[in-house]
Image (tube, rainbow, N blue to C red):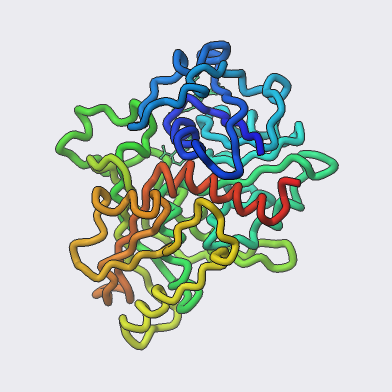
Amino acid sequence: MYVGILGATGAVGQKFIRLLQNHPWFKIAALGASHRSAGKKYKDAANWIEDVALPDYIAEMTVANCDPAEFGNVDFVFSGLDSSVAGEIEGAFAKAGIPVISNAKNYRMDPTVPLLVPEVNPDHIELIKTQTFTEDGSGWIVTNPNCVAVPLSLALKPIYDAFGIEAMVVTTMQAISGAGYPGVPSMDILGNVVPFISGEEPKIAPETQKLLGKLDRGTLKTPGYPVQATCTRVPTLNGHMAAVTVKLANKPSSIKEVKEVVLTFENPIAHLELPFAPKEVIKLHEEERFPQPRLHADHENGMQLHMGRLREAEVFDLSFVCMAHNTIRGAAGGAILNAELLVKKGYME
Ligand code: NAP
């Protein structure tokens, strides 16, 4: 299939280009960015920050405006657009009959738009049928969550299904690559922790709860437990970590029972054998000093969720940490997995 990338010059756009090299199903056919980049060769428009060489055929491609009329023939587009423009541009592509797989926040909470992590809520893709961008249903939007909602939802899924959740307190330690490029000023982050990330905390409750929601006759029923979130920026490069404490609705008999639930999590997409799917979705670490972003964020091509420090809590019931690669599992890689699921389920035909 021929794919386009909106926001191709940005940090997430570059990750798409890198991850899609040699993809067995998808070939990059168009690159879009702002009027500042449009008309230039990609190598002149983008400040390439990936640690592999820019592929020659991408370097020579001309960047287009993010206008469906100028975009050539693509089967669908990935979007790594800045949220200040993603709403309008992604809507225009969907209205032009071009499916959009987006990383931006603009449509995440739209009740007709699936907010998707394939191992958590693959059935939510049915919501696509309720979208009205085109009369024939050819244009639609699917989003992936905020980069820290991804590890949280993957870690919470088996626990929520087995025991229910009544309250959650979470503190995140988010890597600098989450702020795009050039991102956080070095004077702010070197040897430091910044205890606030603008706009991040209010996304955690609604996004993780939408992901854990159950579809009931076309309507999503979402949990409404209170969440106290503190999001911090720490001087790691990749891998967002979160320290979580939850109050459970039904108390487990022991920590061993919780571990068993996590270890026997039934991955609902395992049988589909999607190219970007990790073989072991949740890696539960027993060593108390693990997981660590530098040691584990790249495991299973950056698509694995790491959990550790699973223990009884002094307040509430259960504490743990979770961590995943923010620009791969939490952004471009997650979006590619979403696209693979949608292809396999026949939504791209
Ligand atoms: P970024 O590095 O700032 O890149 C933004 C992209 O948007 C660039 O390609 C830019 O093109 C393009 N753009 C800006 N204004 C435009 C306009 N008026 N018309 C068309 N294109 C325009 O940002 P990023 O970190 O890659 O993030 C991209 C999106 O993904 C954001 O919505 C972000 O919230 C989301 N996200 C990021 C992460 C992460 O870990 N970084 C994780 C999950 C989700 P020019 O180069 O031409 O300006």
In the figure, is residue 236 to the left or right of 85?
A: left
In-front residue for pair 326/342 = 342
Q: In the image, 344: left or right of 104?
A: right
For residue 246, what is the image quadrant? bottom left
Could you tell me which quadrant the N terminus lies in? top right
Task: Please tell me whether residue 36 is drawn above or below residue 293 in the rendered image.
Answer: above
Vertically, is 8 above or below 334?
above
State left or right for residue 189 relative to residue 320: left
Q: Quadrant of residue 195?
A: top left
Which residue is farthest right? 135
Residue for point 78% across, 42% down: 138
Determine the residue located farthest toward the bottom in the rendered image. 253
In the rendered image, residue 14, in percent from the top left (x then y), is placed at 45, 31
Whole-percent x, y for residue 337 in the image: 54, 50
Q: Please report the residue visible at 61 percent of the width from the left and 54 percent of the height from the top.
A: 341
Name of the residue lying farthest toward the left: 191
Residue 59 spot, x, y in % from top left: 48, 20
Q: Nearer the viewer, residue 302 or 160?
A: 302
Whole-percent x, y for residue 204 in the image: 44, 53
Question: In the figure, 10 relative to 194: above or below?
Answer: above
Relative placement, left or right, of 244 versus 143 is left
Vertical side of 164 occupied by 95: above or below? above
Q: How many marks?
A: 0
Closest to the observer, 49 or 188: 49
Image point 65% across, 34% down: which residue? Answer: 2
Between residue 96 and residue 28, name the one nearer to us. 28
